Image (spheres, rainbow, N blue to C red):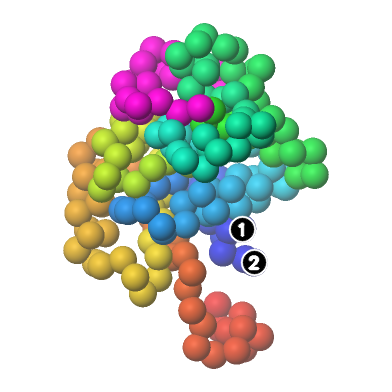
């Protein structure tokens, strides 16, 4: 069983016990690989014949987004600020039945957007339509809206880059998230290096 299948199995059992469906995937800082982990987890859910949606909650505008004008997708920002319907901006990858709600154009005040009634209503709509909602969140250390997302989510998953993020940084992030009152499921160690051949390692796990 691959790490993402193990993680989704754990998340499934936690949700059954607690009637949860909204998971926030976040990290202590940028560059931990949160978006990659969130997408793989969401795909793992969808492949298990569940209705899953991945929501990009990174709402700060990016230079990359602005330079790709022709490929712009409306998304969460337009739902919050322009009153577009959630249904109108959700995209679907038919290969693995995964729905995706893009961030959209972004906003200069992400924390205000996340704390808005429109965002709350959007999450409620998604709760009624999907089995699993995976929030791809910004890093805790630099983006205060991540704690707002933690309060909205049922369970938080912390992504840690192996052999890179200091233990004290992880501990501070954990304490920050615990103050929101949301349950932390655990951490996913990303970009882990294996010092023995993979074909041997798989027999040891």
Residue furthest out toward the right:
95
Is residue 16 in view? no
Residue 142 picture quarter:
top left
Tell me the CA gap for discs 2 and 1: 6 Å
Q: Nearer the viewer, residue 170 or 181?
A: 170
Residue 75 magenta-highlighted: no
Rendered image: mark on residue 26: none
Rendered image: mark on residue 1: 2
Does the magenta stretch mainly form a helix, a strand or a loop?
helix
Quadrant position of the C terminus in the picture: bottom right
Left or right of residue 101: residue 186: left
Q: Which residue is mark 1?
A: 5
Residue 117 picture quarter:
top left
- Whether 196 is drawn above or below 45: the answer is below
Q: Mark 2 Cα within 10 Å, few/some/many (few <14, many 20+)?
A: few
Residue 116 magenta-highlighted: yes
Tell me what residue is drawn at x 41 percent, y 57 percent.
Answer: 31
- Whether 45 is drawn above or below 4: the answer is above
Q: Position of residue 40 (x, y in %)?
A: 60, 52
Provide the residue span drawn in magenta. 105-126
């Amino acid at each position: 069983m691959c790490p993402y299948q193990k993680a989704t199995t754990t998340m499934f059992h936690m949700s059954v016990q607690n009637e949860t469906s909204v998971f926030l995937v976040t990290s202590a800082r940028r560059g931990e690989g949160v978006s990659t982990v969130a997408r793989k987890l969401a795909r793992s859910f969808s492949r298990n014949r569940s209705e899953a949606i991945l929501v990009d909650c990174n709402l700060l505008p990016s230079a990359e987004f602005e330079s790709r004008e022709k490929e712009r997708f409306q998304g969460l920002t337009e739902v919050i600020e322009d009153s577009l319907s959630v249904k109108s901006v959700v995209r679907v990858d038919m290969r693995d039945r995964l729905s995706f709600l893009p961030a959209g154009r972004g906003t200069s005040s992400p924390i205000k957007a996340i704390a808005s009634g429109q965002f709350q209503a959007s999450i409620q709509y998604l709760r009624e339509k999907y089995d699993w909602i995976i929030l791809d969140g910004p890093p805790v250390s630099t983006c205060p809206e991540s704690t707002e997302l933690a309060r909205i989510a049922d369970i938080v998953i912390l992504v840690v880059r192996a052999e890179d993020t200091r233990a004290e940084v992880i501990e501070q992030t954990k304490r920050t998230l615990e103050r929101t009152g949301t349950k932390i499921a655990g951490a996913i160690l990303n970009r882990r290096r294996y010092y023995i051949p993979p074909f041997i390692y798989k027999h040891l796990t």
